[in-house]
Amino acid sequence: FVLVGTEILALGVMGQKAWANVYFTSPAPGALQVQAQAEQFAFYFRYPGPDGQFGTIHPDKIDEGNQNYFGLDPANDVAARDDIVSGQLVVPVNREVQLLMHAKDVGHSFYVRELRIQQDFVPGLDLSLHFTATEIGKYEIVCTQLCGLGHYNMKAYLNVMSQEDYDKWQKEQAAQ
Protein backbone atom coordinates (compact mmCIF):
# COMPACT_ATOMS: atom_id res chain seq x y z
CA PHE A 1 0.00 0.00 0.00
CA VAL A 2 2.90 2.35 0.67
CA LEU A 3 4.23 1.78 -2.85
CA VAL A 4 0.83 2.50 -4.42
CA GLY A 5 0.42 5.62 -2.29
CA THR A 6 3.87 6.86 -3.29
CA GLU A 7 3.08 6.31 -6.99
CA ILE A 8 -0.22 8.17 -6.71
CA LEU A 9 1.48 11.05 -4.90
CA ALA A 10 4.22 11.22 -7.55
CA LEU A 11 1.66 11.25 -10.37
CA GLY A 12 -0.31 13.95 -8.58
CA VAL A 13 2.76 16.17 -8.18
CA MET A 14 3.80 15.71 -11.82
CA GLY A 15 0.22 16.30 -12.99
CA GLN A 16 -0.01 19.49 -10.92
CA LYS A 17 3.18 20.81 -12.52
CA ALA A 18 1.83 20.05 -16.01
CA TRP A 19 -1.51 21.69 -15.15
CA ALA A 20 0.24 24.78 -13.78
CA ASN A 21 2.41 25.07 -16.91
CA VAL A 22 -0.71 25.17 -19.06
CA TYR A 23 -3.12 27.24 -16.97
CA PHE A 24 -1.01 29.45 -14.72
CA THR A 25 1.68 30.76 -17.06
CA SER A 26 1.27 34.05 -18.85
CA PRO A 27 1.72 34.31 -22.60
CA ALA A 28 4.98 35.74 -23.88
CA PRO A 29 5.06 39.54 -24.34
CA GLY A 30 5.12 39.19 -28.15
CA ALA A 31 2.12 36.85 -28.34
CA LEU A 32 -0.48 37.61 -31.00
CA GLN A 33 -3.62 38.82 -29.23
CA VAL A 34 -6.96 37.85 -30.75
CA GLN A 35 -10.37 38.43 -29.24
CA ALA A 36 -12.74 35.47 -29.56
CA GLN A 37 -16.48 35.84 -29.17
CA ALA A 38 -18.91 32.94 -28.98
CA GLU A 39 -22.62 33.33 -29.55
CA GLN A 40 -25.50 31.15 -30.61
CA PHE A 41 -24.33 29.58 -33.00
CA ALA A 42 -21.09 31.09 -34.26
CA PHE A 43 -17.57 32.13 -33.35
CA TYR A 44 -16.10 35.50 -34.33
CA PHE A 45 -12.47 36.58 -34.02
CA ARG A 46 -11.14 40.12 -33.85
CA TYR A 47 -7.59 41.23 -34.54
CA PRO A 48 -6.05 44.63 -33.90
CA GLY A 49 -5.36 46.40 -37.16
CA PRO A 50 -2.08 47.96 -38.28
CA ASP A 51 -2.15 50.33 -35.27
CA GLY A 52 -1.84 47.31 -32.95
CA GLN A 53 -4.77 48.41 -30.76
CA PHE A 54 -8.24 47.01 -30.26
CA GLY A 55 -11.13 49.42 -30.49
CA THR A 56 -13.50 49.67 -27.53
CA ILE A 57 -16.48 47.32 -27.47
CA HIS A 58 -19.89 48.97 -27.13
CA PRO A 59 -22.57 46.30 -26.47
CA ASP A 60 -25.34 48.74 -27.43
CA LYS A 61 -23.83 49.04 -30.93
CA ILE A 62 -23.87 45.32 -31.71
CA ASP A 63 -25.70 44.93 -35.01
CA GLU A 64 -25.49 41.53 -36.63
CA GLY A 65 -27.40 42.74 -39.69
CA ASN A 66 -24.49 45.07 -40.45
CA GLN A 67 -21.89 42.50 -39.33
CA ASN A 68 -20.89 44.58 -36.29
CA TYR A 69 -20.59 41.52 -34.05
CA PHE A 70 -18.38 43.20 -31.44
CA GLY A 71 -20.22 46.52 -31.22
CA LEU A 72 -17.41 48.65 -32.62
CA ASP A 73 -17.86 52.38 -33.15
CA PRO A 74 -15.39 53.31 -35.90
CA ALA A 75 -17.00 56.73 -36.38
CA ASN A 76 -15.98 57.81 -32.86
CA ASP A 77 -13.16 55.39 -31.96
CA VAL A 78 -9.97 55.70 -34.01
CA ALA A 79 -8.60 52.38 -32.70
CA ALA A 80 -11.70 50.51 -33.97
CA ARG A 81 -11.39 51.74 -37.56
CA ASP A 82 -8.80 49.18 -38.58
CA ASP A 83 -9.86 46.21 -36.42
CA ILE A 84 -10.22 42.99 -38.42
CA VAL A 85 -13.21 40.73 -37.71
CA SER A 86 -13.31 37.23 -39.15
CA GLY A 87 -15.37 34.08 -38.87
CA GLN A 88 -12.18 32.00 -38.87
CA LEU A 89 -9.18 32.09 -36.57
CA VAL A 90 -6.08 32.72 -38.67
CA VAL A 91 -2.68 32.47 -36.98
CA PRO A 92 0.95 32.16 -38.04
CA VAL A 93 2.72 28.87 -37.38
CA ASN A 94 5.11 28.70 -34.41
CA ARG A 95 3.89 31.96 -32.89
CA GLU A 96 2.20 32.09 -29.52
CA VAL A 97 -1.42 33.24 -29.65
CA GLN A 98 -3.39 34.66 -26.75
CA LEU A 99 -7.15 34.34 -27.14
CA LEU A 100 -9.15 36.85 -25.12
CA MET A 101 -12.48 35.05 -24.84
CA HIS A 102 -16.02 36.10 -23.98
CA ALA A 103 -19.51 34.73 -24.57
CA LYS A 104 -22.28 36.94 -25.86
CA ASP A 105 -25.20 34.88 -24.61
CA VAL A 106 -24.89 31.40 -23.06
CA GLY A 107 -22.04 29.04 -22.19
CA HIS A 108 -19.95 27.79 -25.11
CA SER A 109 -16.64 26.03 -25.55
CA PHE A 110 -13.57 26.44 -27.74
CA TYR A 111 -12.18 23.02 -28.65
CA VAL A 112 -9.49 22.15 -31.20
CA ARG A 113 -8.87 18.42 -31.04
CA GLU A 114 -5.57 18.39 -32.94
CA LEU A 115 -3.99 20.96 -30.61
CA ARG A 116 -5.44 19.37 -27.47
CA ILE A 117 -6.89 22.66 -26.27
CA GLN A 118 -10.28 23.35 -24.78
CA GLN A 119 -11.64 26.30 -22.84
CA ASP A 120 -15.18 27.19 -21.90
CA PHE A 121 -16.71 30.58 -22.66
CA VAL A 122 -18.67 31.80 -19.65
CA PRO A 123 -21.15 34.69 -20.03
CA GLY A 124 -20.01 37.72 -18.04
CA LEU A 125 -16.48 36.38 -17.58
CA ASP A 126 -13.49 37.33 -19.75
CA LEU A 127 -11.10 34.39 -20.05
CA SER A 128 -7.70 33.95 -21.64
CA LEU A 129 -6.17 30.96 -23.40
CA HIS A 130 -2.77 30.81 -25.03
CA PHE A 131 -1.31 28.26 -27.42
CA THR A 132 1.24 27.81 -30.19
CA ALA A 133 0.27 25.93 -33.35
CA THR A 134 3.31 24.09 -34.70
CA GLU A 135 1.94 22.64 -37.95
CA ILE A 136 0.47 24.46 -40.92
CA GLY A 137 -3.07 23.33 -41.68
CA LYS A 138 -6.77 23.92 -41.24
CA TYR A 139 -8.35 22.62 -38.04
CA GLU A 140 -11.97 22.52 -36.93
CA ILE A 141 -13.02 24.53 -33.88
CA VAL A 142 -16.14 23.15 -32.25
CA CYS A 143 -18.37 24.07 -29.34
CA THR A 144 -18.60 21.22 -26.83
CA GLN A 145 -21.26 22.82 -24.60
CA LEU A 146 -24.90 22.15 -25.39
CA CYS A 147 -25.79 25.76 -26.17
CA GLY A 148 -29.16 25.43 -27.92
CA LEU A 149 -30.89 23.94 -30.94
CA GLY A 150 -28.18 24.98 -33.41
CA HIS A 151 -25.34 23.62 -31.26
CA TYR A 152 -24.65 20.75 -33.67
CA ASN A 153 -23.61 23.25 -36.34
CA MET A 154 -21.55 25.65 -34.19
CA LYS A 155 -18.07 25.47 -35.61
CA ALA A 156 -15.34 27.57 -37.12
CA TYR A 157 -11.87 26.89 -38.46
CA LEU A 158 -8.37 27.53 -37.19
CA ASN A 159 -6.20 28.29 -40.21
CA VAL A 160 -2.50 27.97 -39.37
CA MET A 161 -0.27 29.42 -42.07
CA SER A 162 3.29 30.58 -42.65
CA GLN A 163 4.23 34.01 -41.33
CA GLU A 164 4.42 35.34 -44.90
CA ASP A 165 0.94 34.06 -45.75
CA TYR A 166 -0.42 35.39 -42.46
CA ASP A 167 1.02 38.86 -43.15
CA LYS A 168 -0.53 38.77 -46.64
CA TRP A 169 -3.92 37.69 -45.20
CA GLN A 170 -3.81 40.45 -42.61
CA LYS A 171 -3.04 43.10 -45.25
CA GLU A 172 -5.91 41.84 -47.42
CA GLN A 173 -8.32 41.96 -44.47
CA ALA A 174 -7.18 45.44 -43.40
CA ALA A 175 -7.79 46.73 -46.94
CA GLN A 176 -11.47 45.72 -46.83
Image (cartoon, helix red, strand yellow):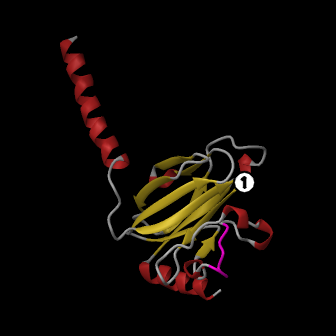
For the view shown, which residue lies furthest in the bottom direction?
Answer: 175
- Rendered location of residue 172, percent (x, y): 59, 86
Outermost residue on the top side: it is: 1
Q: Taken as a whole, is the magenta stretch helix, strand or loop?
A: loop
Q: Which of the 4 image quarters holds residue 95?
A: bottom left
Which quarter of the rendering shows the N terminus?
top left
Q: Nearer the viewer, residue 150 or 45?
A: 45
Up/down of 90 relative to 176, above or below: above
| Residue 159 coordinates in the image, percent (x, y) | 54, 68
Q: Is 147 a magenta residue?
A: no
Residue 19, percent from left and from top: 34, 41
What is the secondary structure assignment of the residue under circle 1? Answer: loop
Start-end of magenta stretch: 71-76
- At x 77% / y 73%, what residue is drawn? 66
Question: Which residue is rendered at x = 69% and y = 49% of the image?
Answer: 105
Rendering quarter of residue 12: top left
**Closer to the camera, 43 or 6?**
43
Mark 1 highlights which residue?
Answer: 41
